[in-house]
């Protein structure tokens, strides 16, 4: 089946620095990738939707200058948390689809990345 | 704003019993509904999808959909300790985005 890989699975960074998280589709071309954030005991909150070769569409309340998303190829999207602060510590999850009009059974999730900002 | 609501639990069920998880959604026009299981510290995994009114069974899992009541549920028969997880209801509102509920934490008691 389709596989989406995220890296790193865990990262600790100092406050004020930037950290990049990669999301790769391993055996299909992902036309659309989604980035979610999940705080402990809360649900997944969609941060942004990115389509290959175009600018990401951010959800309301998500700072696009703080959470930089690049979807430069059909197999790779990156999320860069810039000037990270402790409140950015969270579980970040990407998902990907190769279909237009994607529904839940055509969206594949990565393993997630735990970010801790100290 | 389109919403998906779940009882956060925790829901405790004895091993071997039936676990019943419920979800309501705000958009009457929604067509696609999904149940994901998420173990602590892991990504969600899809366990059931349902599109039509009625029941859909897959092994020990049964999804039930009632569009008139805007209600979708998940039944887990013969509950096992390995079923202990958070169950997320997700609704596709037709804009290429899945909206997730807050999840219900289920604990199966041996």
Image: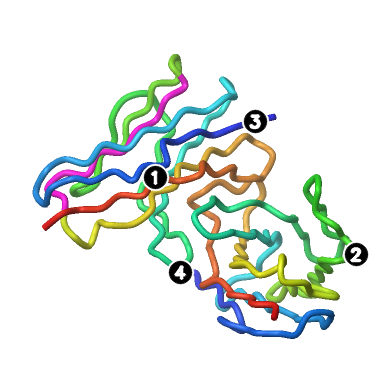
The image shows residue A70 at horizontal and vertical percentages of: 82, 71
Does the magenta-highlighted stretch encompass residue A63?
Answer: no
Report the chain holding disc 2: A
Residue A73 appears left or right of A46: right
Report the residue at 67% width, 49% height from top.
A100
Q: Nearer the viewer, residue B94 or A38?
A: A38
Labels 3 and 1 share a subunit: yes
Looking at the rendered structure, which numbered label has been put on residue B41? 4
Q: Which badge, 3 or 1, comes first in the chain's sequence?
A: 3
Q: Which disc, if any, is residue B2?
A: 3
Circle 4 crowding by C-alpha within 10 Å: few under 14, some 14–19, many from 20:
few
Q: Is residue B15 left or right of residue A95?
A: left
Q: Is residue A1 above or below residue A18?
A: above
Looking at the rendering, in which quadrant would you find the N terminus of chain B? top right
Asked whether the residues under marks 4 and 1 belong to the same chain, the reply is yes
Residue range highlighted in magenta: B70-79
Which residue occupies 69% across, 81% down? A118
**Residue A86 position within the rendered picture, expressed as x and y whole percent measured from the top left:** 72, 71
Residue with the mark numbered 1: B104
**SS category of the residue bearing label 4:** loop
Q: Which residue is tagged 2?
A: A65
* Residue at (82, 83) in percent of width and height: A17
Tell me, yes or no, whether dots 2 and 1 are on the same chain. Answer: no
| Chain for numbered disc 4 | B
């Amino acid at each position: 089946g389709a596989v989406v890989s995220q890296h790193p699975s865990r990262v600790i960074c100092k406050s004020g620095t930037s950290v990049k998280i990669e999301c790769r589709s391993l055996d299909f071309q992902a036309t659309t990738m989604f980035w979610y954030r999940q705080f402990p005991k809360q649900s997944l909150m969609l941060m942004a939707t990115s389509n290959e070769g175009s600018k990401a569409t951010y959800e309301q309340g998500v700072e696009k200058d703080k959470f930089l998303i690049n979807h430069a190829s059909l197999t790779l999207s990156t999320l860069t948390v810039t000037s990270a602060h402790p409140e950015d510590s969270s579980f970040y999850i990407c998902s990907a689809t190769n279909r237009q009009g994607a529904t839940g059974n055509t969206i594949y999730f990565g393993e997630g990345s735990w970010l801790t900002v100290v | 704003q389109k919403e998906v609501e779940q009882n956060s639990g925790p829901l405790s069920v004895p091993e071997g019993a039936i676990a019943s998880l419920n979800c309501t959604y705000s958009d009457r026009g929604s067509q696609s509904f999904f149940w994901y299981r998420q173990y602590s510290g892991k990504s969600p995994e899809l366990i059931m999808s349902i599109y039509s009114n009625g029941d859909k069974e897959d092994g020990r899992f049964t999804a039930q959909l009632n569009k008139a009541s805007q209600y979708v549920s998940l039944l887990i028969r013969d509950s096992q300790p390995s079923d202990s997880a958070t169950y997320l209801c997700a609704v596709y509102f037709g804009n290429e985005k899945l909206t997730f509920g807050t999840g219900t934490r289920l604990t199966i008691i041996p």
